[in-house]
Amino acid sequence: MTHRDLPTSSTASQTAINVLTALLEARTGQQIAAYRSWRLDTALKPLLRARKLDTLDQLVTQLLQGSDRQIGDSIVDALVNQETSFFRDALVFEMLAEAVTDVEQDGRRARIWCAGCSTGQEPLSLAMQFAERREASGASMPEIVATDVSDAAIVRARSGRFSQFEIQRGLPVRRMIRWFDTTGTDWVAKPELLALVTYRRMNLVSDQPPPGQFDIVLCRNVLLYLSTKTKGQVFPKIAAALKPGGMLVMGAGETVIGQTRVFEPSKRFRGFYETPIEARS
C-alpha cells in the first residue's frame, strides 16, 4: 500500500499525510503502514502544542516553507517508534551472556552494538548485566556501543534519566537502587553505569556503522518498519560490521528468512542469526 492509500488523519489532508510519511521514509527508511496512520495524530500532538498549531496541515506548511531547519528533525524524532523497556525478553539476555562467554573463551573482549537503542534501556540493561557479572566473577566487561537515528533519543539515552513508569518496566527494586539515583520523581543512572555505554547518532540506512567489527549486533524491532528494498541494503551493512562468527539479534517477530542470504538462523540461539560458514572464509 502506498502513501496515497493511507486513510486521512482527523487533523490532516491527504497531502499533509503524504508529506509527513515521505519525510520519515526519506530520513530513516521507516514506513508507516496504512493501519498505523493514526500515529501521525498521536505522535505529533505534542509538537503541534509546542508550536501553537491546530492541524498537521499547518505543521506541514511550516516544514515546506523551509525557514525553520529544526522542524524536520522534530517531526522525524516524534514519528520514530521508540518503544522499549529494560531487559525486554529476558531469555535474549540469558543467551547473550552465553554468547559473550564464548567470545571470551577465545581470549577476546566482546564488542556489542545496539542498533536502534531508543532512549537507552537496552544498552543499559546489557551494562547492568555484565557489570554485575564482573563484580561476581571478575569477568571482563564487553564494549557496548549504542546508536539511534533520533537526536532526541540519543540525548535522553546519554542523560540516563527515566520516569517512574519507565524504570519499573523490567527492573526489580534491587537493580533500581543499585544502579540509579532518585531525582524528584525521576530515576537517573549512576555515572559508573553510564560510562559503560558509548552513544552516537546513526542512521542505519544511510550512515556507516560504528568503527571496528562487533561480535554481536542487537537490532530488535527496527527493521520491521523498513521496506523490503531498504532491508536489502541494511542486512549487508550489518553483516560487514560483524566479525567472522558474529551474530545478529532481531526481535521476536522478525526473521531473515526470505529477506536476505547474508544471514542464516543460528543453530544454538533462537532468534539469533549468523553469516553462512562459506561467507566467513
Image (tube, helix red, strand yellow):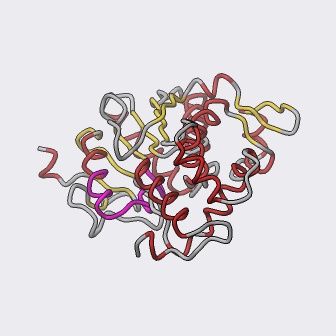
Q: Does 248 lie within the magenta span?
A: no
Vertical side of 127 occupied by 76: above or below: below
- Residue 24 image point, x, y percent: 48, 53
Q: Does 229 lie within the magenta span?
A: yes
- Residue 60 image point, x, y percent: 58, 54
Residue at 44% in and 44% down: 115
Q: Which residues are magenta?
A: 219-234
Q: Looking at the image, how many numbered discs can be counted on the residues?
A: 0
Q: Quadrant of residue 226?
A: bottom left
Task: Name the foreground residue: 14 vs 265.
Answer: 14
Task: Name the foreground residue: 138 vs 159.
Answer: 159
Q: Quadrant of residue 259?
A: bottom left
- Residue 215 image point, x, y percent: 34, 39
Residue at 47% in and 27% down: 140
Left or right position of 120 against 252 = right
* Secondary structure mainly formed by the magenta segment: helix
Residue at 61% in and 43% down: 121
Quarter of the image where the N terminus is located? bottom left
Task: Name the foreground residue: 45 vs 101.
Answer: 45
Left or right position of 207 against 182 = left
